Amino acid sequence: MIVRSVVLVLACGLTASLNAQTQPSAATVFQNVRIFDGKVGRLSGSSYVLVRGNRIEQISSTPIPADRRADALLIDGGGRTLMPGLIDVHWHAMLVRPTPAAAMAADVGYTNLVAAAEAADTLLRGFTTVRDLGGPSFGLKRAIDEGIVAGPRIFPSGAVITVTSGHGDFRQLFELPRILGGPPTRMEALGASMVADSPDEVRVRVREQLMLGASQIKLTAGGGVASPHSPLDVSTFTEPELRAAVEAAENWGTYVTVHAYTPATIRRAIAAGVKCIEHGHLMDEATAKLIAQQGIWLSIQPFPDEMADVFPPGSQEREKAQEVLAATERAYALAKKYRLKTAFGTDVLFSQALAQRQGSLLAKLVRWYTPAEALVMATGTNAQLLAMSGKRSPYPGKLGVVEEGALADLLLVDGNPLEDIKLVEDPAKNFVLIMKDGKIYKNTLGR
Ligand SMILES: [Zn+2]
């Protein structure tokens, strides 16, 4: 009985504090902040920012008359940095914490609750938006958008679409052969990935994801590191299959992005009308040139050196991870040389520990970019990639920038991240206030 009431008190306490933090304030005024606007790599002078509802209404270098309504909140920034919420354009909200086996076999209710806990942590790391590149995240997204649980905005792709044996085909060999028109496999029933082996099948699977609410479509055009059945060097979809996906997505006002590492895979995807390449680590000089000429996005990740360690020594997956890691240096060099439209994402999979280093992975970009360039990439530039969803964006309005009229996703940082990017490695300490959609989810000022 005592145990029970303690649990009850704990549960009520949690609910109360979550509600208190997420009560929308009609207006918030940030006083005396220096702004990093997500576009230009320097701070403004002392500024004042008024947020009303979910938008930034006014930015001024002189004090904004405080809204006298009782529900107006005044925040004394004390000269701290106000910047846009961070964006991760390669995320898998449903696959961050579970093991691959648990993702496939665990109770779906449990999987969703685990993903919700991770989503709250993601937001509290300062990532106010993620582009989800595979996994059944529609329910989580809806619960976040309705304010039932805390989490980032999600641009969902729904299920990854792959070919038989491709990256994302996690079936066991004994499950072959597939009977065309037969019942869905476990991964398909979950909405994690869909197998399609002809242009017609691709069209069906793409349109299903769009019907579910996908803001963009993700196909795996070549082999991958973590996939058991696809070598890294293979191209999987044919050009007509890729083109079928592109056509269906474009009819719906959005675009296709593909998982692709090798020059051959990247070139085929571009020929088919794909607008964004995920990874691209193994590209060569000629392919980088093509990406530049065609104005294609490169969504590449500074994978952590330990990525290979999660696979058993001697395994093919470990070898593939090492090959990708070894190519990372050159890929970023090419991206810089040809001024590719480069976006930042992490692609954290199956590791809560790694997810906690999401900010560190961003800071890792200073190997190739200045802190300011890295932070512009993770805010204003990433938002331009999100904007390719057009009217299929779930969140009409401007993201990734601090400007009048933009959506109010804001971080108040204790220090200047443009000088010291390591501040983003410890969000618990250095992000003293986190706002998403005009609502404050964290505020440690005055404590
Ligand atoms: Zn991925």
Image (cartoon, grey):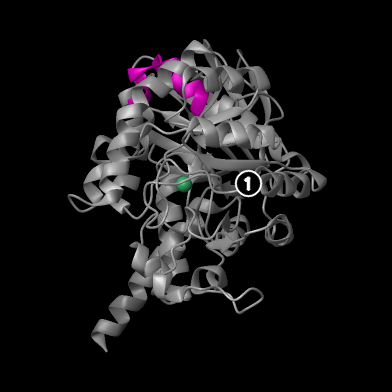
Which residue occupies the foreground of this view, 322 or 420? Answer: 322
Which stretch did the figure color magenta? Answer: 364-378
Residue 106 location in percent, x, y?
Answer: 39, 74
Residue 81 location in percent, x, y?
Answer: 45, 22
Majority SS type along the magenta span: helix
Q: Quadrant of residue 221?
A: top right
108 falls in the magenta region: no
Quarter of the image where the N terminus is located:
bottom left
Q: Is residue 278 above or below residue 330?
A: below
Which residue occupies the foreground of this view, 372 or 318? Answer: 318
Amino acid residing under circle 1 = Thr
Q: Please indicate, yes or no, whether residue 225 appears anywhere in the rendered image.
A: yes
Quarter of the image where the C terminus is located:
top left
Q: Is residue 20 above or below residue 70?
A: below
Could you tell whether 287 is left or right of 394 in the image? left
Q: Which residue is mark 1?
A: 238
Which residue occupies the foreground of this view, 137 or 405? Answer: 137
Q: How many marks?
A: 1
Q: Is residue 271 above or below residue 186?
A: above
375 falls in the magenta region: yes
